[in-house]
Amino acid sequence: MNGPIDAPPSLEAEALCWPARRAPILRGVSLAVRDGEMLGLVGPNGSGKSTLLRLLAGLLPPARGEVRLLGRPLRRTPRREVARLVALVEQQAETLERITLRDAVELGRTPWLSALRPWGAEDDGIVAGAMAAVDVQHLAARDWASLSGGERQRAHIARALAQRPRILLLDEPTNHLDIHHQLALLELVAALPVTKVIALHDLNQAMRCDRLAVLQAGRLIRLGPPAEVLTPELLRDVFGVRAAFVTDPEDGARLLRFLSIS
């Protein structure tokens, strides 16, 4: 556990609701993210994970309920301060501008710049470190349009790291990445000394989180340590699969093995 159990929450959601035409996307979701922990969001497609992340980042205003950032209502926190504290990496984050990969990463420094605090050597160092952390430094001069989906994904994560946030929100960040970069990214994120909320599709990857929040049809149905939350009964009822834990003989890690329900 990266964040102490008794640590104050960095980010809180209270009875969050978000509407849609046919059915609500989120229905009364409440949770508190401890300072320094990595909270995983899991659930079937359409369960509300991406919407919850956008609400936590302040990109969507809740229809009902409230988000609190470091104990303060998010809606009363100046946008510049929010941008310094919270970074979000979305699944479909894109840019249509003709820029290089380094240009895209440099955007992460925007909240920290002003007429009184122009770009300097410190910013160069932060951007270089962020690119190196996700292994894209050799692509710095490449035109954005020439990058693969995985390279763009890593660039977006580098941009978020360059922002130097206290809270990092990631929406299925391993999408488009090969297995080597998936593992490297998860190790990097887990080691960051910040609060993390990460939506994941792969439940074995989600086992690395300190706690998991399980969403189903817009509701939070379970919250707790992965081994306690991902029971065979929950996996059957929520994900429609049979599952059992197996132990890796090499390092003793517990892994999930899935079978279809016939």
Image (cartoon, helix red, strand yellow):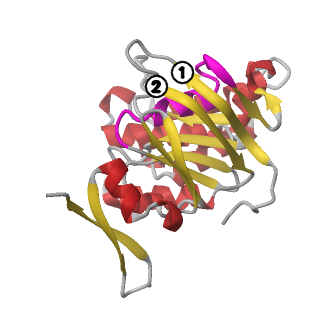
Q: Residue at x 37, y 15 (%)?
A: 22
Element at badge 2?
Answer: loop
Position of residue 49 measured from the top left corner of the image (x, y, whole percent): 47, 37
Going by the numbered disc 1, the residue's amino acid type is Trp
Task: Work out which residue is located at the far right of the displayed protein and give it.
Answer: 116
Element at badge 1?
Answer: strand
Q: Is residue 199 above or below residue 218?
A: below
Going by the numbered disc 2, the residue's amino acid type is Ile
- Circle 1: is it few (<14), some (14-19), or many (20+) Cα within 10 Å? many
Q: Which residue is mark 1?
A: 18
Which range of residues does the magenta coloring cover? 44-65
Confirm whether residue 230 shows in the render: yes
Position of residue 50 measured from the top left corner of the image (x, y, whole percent): 47, 33
Label 2 close to label 1 by CB (< 8 Å): yes
Answer with left or right where residue 140 lies relative to residue 244: right
Nearer-N-terminus badge (2/1):
1
Answer with left or right where residue 107 lies relative to residue 134: right
Q: Which residue is mark 2?
A: 25
- Circle 2: is it few (<14), some (14-19), or many (20+) Cα within 10 Å? many
Q: Quick one: quadrant of the C terminus? A: bottom left
Q: Is residue 133 above or below residue 232?
A: above
The front one of 223 and 41 is 223
In which quarter of the view is residue 53 placed? top right
Answer with left or right where residue 146 lies relative to residue 231: left
